[in-house]
Image (tube, rainbow, N blue to C red):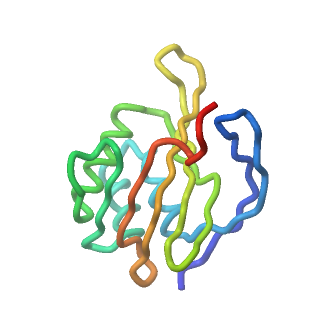
Amino acid sequence: MKAKTAHRDTLVRYDGRTATGEFEVSEPISTFFSAWESQSADARLELIASAVSESVKYDDPRTARTLIGIDSLNDYVGLFSQNAPGWSATVVHCDTIAGVTRVTVAFGGKGPDGQEMIQHGQYFVEMEGELIARMVGFVGNGLPET
């Protein structure tokens, strides 16, 4: 089984409050999101291929249809790197129930005005063995906006 990395981090919620805690995130999930900041298509492909199954399925609000396979996913993640150079995707919270992992990710970097900004996304991940098999992402962190 691939290693899990322990994290202690602070999640800034939409209501301005913070939640601090410890959580573990599996290596494939950490690796997958680290690929989002790679400007090199080859390096990004290597990271993604080490984290997901060959027939991985991926959806989020910006995909017109389910992406299937490593190459499709690599192309899509490359759009993030291309459109938001210098931005990172950092796992800020993770928990697992009944084989489904909920992952909160902070996408951060300089916005068009030059100011640092963070946008959160929440993903639901299913594993196949030690690799990501299915991922469904949502905008925000699941909390109602106030």
**In this rendering, position of residue 138 left or right of residue 64:** right
Numbered disc total: 0
User: What residue is drawn where x is 31% and y is 42%?
Assistant: 62
Q: Is residue 16 above or below residue 143?
A: above
User: What residue is drawn where x is 61% and y is 67%?
Assistant: 25
Quarter that holds the C terminus: top right
User: What residue is drawn where x is 78% and y is 52%?
Assistant: 20
The one of 96 and 143 positioned closer to us in this rendering: 143
**In this rendering, position of residue 92 left or right of residue 81:** right
Quarter of the rendering containing residue 69: bottom left
Q: Is residue 10 above or below residue 32?
A: above
Quarter of the rendering containing residue 26: bottom right
- Across and down, in percent, residue 46 comes to 36, 62
Q: Is residue 51 above or below residue 44?
A: below
- Across and down, in percent, residue 51 comes to 42, 68
The one of 8 and 65 positioned closer to us in this rendering: 65
- Across and down, in percent, residue 136 comes to 39, 58
User: What residue is drawn where x is 76% and y is 49%?
Assistant: 19
- Across and down, in percent, residue 23 comes to 70, 65
Quarter of the rendering containing residue 3: bottom right
The one of 111 and 19 positioned closer to us in this rendering: 19
